[in-house]
Amino acid sequence: MTPANDTGPDSDPQALYGYVASKLGERGIAFLHVVEGATGGPRDIAPFDWKALKAAFGGVYIANNGYDRDTAAAAVTEGTADAVAFGRLFIANPDLVTRFRLNAPLNEPNRDTFYGGGAEGYTDYPALAEAAE
């Protein structure tokens, strides 16, 4: 867990977020979606036991940040996540599920077009069939 909005890091993030996750789990929250590490940055920015967070929650755990086809499949198979969410890869690959299924190459996201407010970078990435032409 990383600092956001200039808050600085917590002195004991494992205890803090483990407590929050356990309380959310007690309330029957449908799922816990976690950006593991720094949003859009490194996963290992600080030592953290994501498996323990999942266990503390006790329900459906959706992991996010820095996953690819193989690491996502491994996380689900190993039980460290119930599902893996993708953001940037879906922006650049509107047919991401098909590409993963076929183990096809991926379009590289263009970070310069993120949050630009226009179509460029959101609706102009080629689908797999178009890329083959």
Image (tube, rainbow, N blue to C red):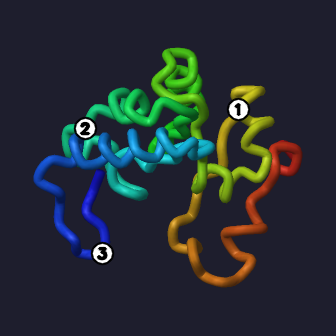
Label 1 secondary element:
helix
Residue 100, label in figure: 1
Q: Residues within 10 Å of mark 3 (few under 14, many from 20)?
A: few
Q: What whole-number distance in Å separates the C-alpha atoms at marks 1 and 3?
A: 34 Å
Give whichever of discs 3 and 2 has the lower sequence position.
Answer: 3
Q: Quadrant of residue 104?
A: top right
**Residue type pointed to by label 3:** Asn
Residue 58 in percent (x, y) is at 48, 30
Residue ID at (48%, 40%): 25
- Image coordinates of residue 133 in percent, x first then y, are 88, 47
Name the one closer to the observer, 35 or 71. 35
* Cα distance in 3D space between marks 3 and 2: 20 Å
Residue at x-position 17% and y-position 59%: 9
Residue at the disc numbered 3: 5
Q: Measured from the top left, where is residue 92 in percent x and y?
A: 66, 56
When asked about the image quadrant of residue 128, the answer is top right
104 to the left or right of 53: right
The disc labelled 2 sits on which kind of residue? Phe
Q: Residues within 10 Å of mark 2 (few under 14, many from 20)?
A: some
